[in-house]
Image: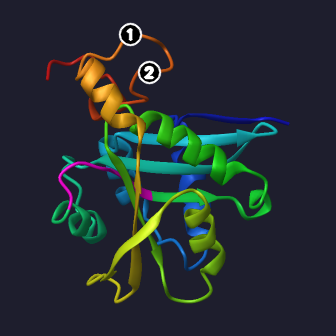
């Protein structure tokens, strides 16, 4: 069956939370309030669906977001423009089946029209060599390391240049064509439930 990558739906947040907290030590745990905060503020929050069930999710922020992650701050102190992958989780039964690559291809398709590079981190505790290898094979390179003050975990800080950005930016600036595949997946405004009341 094919992998479908699409925007998360609000009613799926409980399933996303369960996926996150079952992912093991390579992903920081979340509670419902923190996940709600990410849902309401992330520039990019998409899920992968395979055989009718959620196979994973990816959350991302642009470099100008008001995001409180210490890893995000580490990148922002060093790089002016980037798309930051806050977390990617693939269900254990789906690992090795192409879901991670589908996510990164989709995220890159979105990011390369808007940012010159992508950023993420991989925890260096435990046995994360396969994760580092995955990111390396996708074009990410280590640009430093960061000891996360909130957890005491050391992370390899990874960046990937997005070669298409310069041409897109020079050709279109901020006026990207209005095509369905180009539109921003979501925004903090549209992610919030409409209540019928005035702002």
**Residue at the image position 62 percent from the left and 71 percent from the top:** 133
According to the picture, the residue beneath numbered tag 2 turns out to be: 182
> Can I make out residue 148 in this image?
yes
Residue 146 percent across, percent down from the top left? 31, 81
- Seen in the picture, residue 165 relative to 124 is either above or below; the reply is above
1 horizontally vs 26: left or right: right
Q: Is residue 109 magenta?
A: no
Residue 170 percent across, percent down from the top left? 25, 25
120 horizontally vs 106: left or right: left
The residues colored magenta run 79-86
Q: Disc 1, disc 2: CB below 8 Å?
A: yes
Of the 4 image quadrants, the one containing the C terminus is top left
> Can I make out residue 18 in this image?
no
Task: Examine the image and state in which quarter residue 155 appears.
Answer: bottom left
Q: How many marks?
A: 2
- Which secondary structure, mark 1? loop
**Residue at the image position 49 percent from the left and 14 percent from the top:** 180
Task: Examine the image and state in which quarter residue 147 appears.
Answer: bottom left
Question: Which of the two residues, 5 or 166, is positioned nearer the viewer here?
Answer: 166
Of the 4 image quadrants, the one containing the N terminus is top right
170 horizontally vs 103: left or right: left
In the image, farthest residue toward the top = 178
Residue 182 percent across, percent down from the top left? 44, 21
Q: Residues within 10 Å of mark 2 (few under 14, many from 20)?
A: few
In the image, farthest residue toward the right = 1
- Which secondary structure, mark 2? loop
**Residue at the image position 62 percent from the left and 86 percent from the top:** 127
**Residue at the image position 62 percent from the left and 65 percent from the top:** 134
Question: Which of the two residues, 63 or 158, is positioned nearer the viewer here?
Answer: 158
**Label 1, label 2: how far apart the Cα atoms are:** 7 Å
Question: Which numbered disc covers residue 178?
Answer: 1
């Amino acid at each position: 069956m094919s992998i479908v990558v699409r925007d998360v739906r609000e009613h799926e947040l409980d399933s996303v939370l369960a996926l996150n907290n079952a992912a093991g030590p390579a992903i920081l745990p979340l509670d419902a309030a923190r996940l709600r905060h990410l849902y309401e503020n992330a520039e990019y929050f998409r899920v992968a669906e395979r055989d009718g069930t959620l196979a994973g999710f990816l959350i991302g922020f642009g470099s100008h977001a008001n995001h409180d992650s210490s890893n995000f701050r580490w990148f922002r102190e060093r790089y002016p423009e980037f798309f930051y992958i806050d977390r990617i989780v693939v269900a254990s039964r789906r690992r090795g089946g192409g879901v991670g690559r589908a996510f990164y291809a989709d995220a890159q398709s979105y990011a390369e029209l808007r940012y010159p590079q992508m950023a993420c981190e991989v925890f260096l505790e435990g046995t994360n060599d396969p994760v580092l290898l995955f990111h390396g094979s996708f074009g990410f390179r280590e640009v430093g390391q960061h000891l996360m003050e909130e957890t005491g975990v050391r992370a390899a800080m990874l960046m990937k240049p997005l070669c298409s950005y310069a041409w897109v930016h020079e050709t279109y600036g901020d006026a990207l064509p209005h095509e369905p595949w180009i539109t921003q997946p979501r925004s903090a405004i549209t992610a919030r439930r409409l209540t019928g009341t005035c702002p």
